[in-house]
Image (spheres, rainbow, N blue to C red):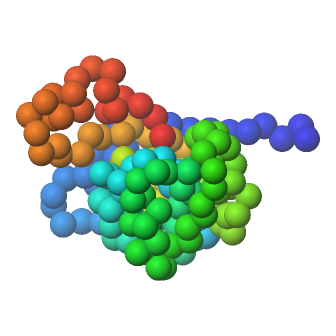
Amino acid sequence: SDRWLGTRTLKASELMPFMTLNGTCPPGPSRTPMVSVIVCAYNAERTMRPCLESLRRLNYPNFEIIVVDDGSRDGTAEIAAAFSDFRLIRQPNRGLGYARNVGLHSARGEIIAYTDSDCVVDPDWLTLLVRAMLEQGSDGCGGPNYAPHEDGRIEACVAAAPGAPCPVLT
């Protein structure tokens, strides 16, 4: 195909008005296509529950959650199975790329959104993502990751350090 694949990175200035605690919500997109959120996990027992709980709080009307357990040897799959409104796919360990493709091939959405099992998403994540893609006519979209609050002092320092999760694009 000669169609150009357009991607766009959200700038902090586009997100910051909606990240303040002023009680306002971001404007919704012009339409709400179905989004398949894919979470790939491997031995993610420590972070799986907070991740999936944050996905339950999404303020977007049309999405599905697919968890791909990539051969975990801990309680990751059991935690994910407790979220009965989400789809769980279990497979032997084959790596992140393979797990992402398994999720992609089982997705029903018009838009595919990936997040990691150690992430906690903002409730308006999909609203912002879909709106940016529709307004700009983009085929892909990414933005900054913000480190979640960590309980321990060492964990918090590592999360806030340069080169840590904060500047990584999703």
Residue at 33% over, 67% down: 53
Quarter that holds the N terminus: top right
Inspect this view and state whether residue 125 appears. no
Write the residue at 89% across / 37% down. 2
In the orientation shown, which residue stands out farthest toward the top? 162
Residue 136, compared with residue 27, is above or below; it is above
Q: In the image, 163: left or right of 38?
A: left
Q: Position of residue 132 (x, y in %)?
A: 52, 51
Between 167 and 149, the residue placed more toward the observer is: 149
Residue 30 lies in what quarter of the image? bottom right
**Viewed as shown, does residue 62 lie left or right of 44?**
right
Residue 139's spot in the image, x, y percent? 67, 47
Q: Is residue 31 above or below residue 92?
A: below
Q: Is 40 displayed left or right of 49 in the figure?
A: right
Residue at 19 percent across and 53 percent down: it is 20
Q: Nearer the viewer, residue 148 or 82?
A: 82
The answer to whether residue 162 of the structure is visible from this angle is yes
Q: Which of 14 and 93 is in front in this view?
A: 93
In percent of width and height, residue 112 lies at 62, 56
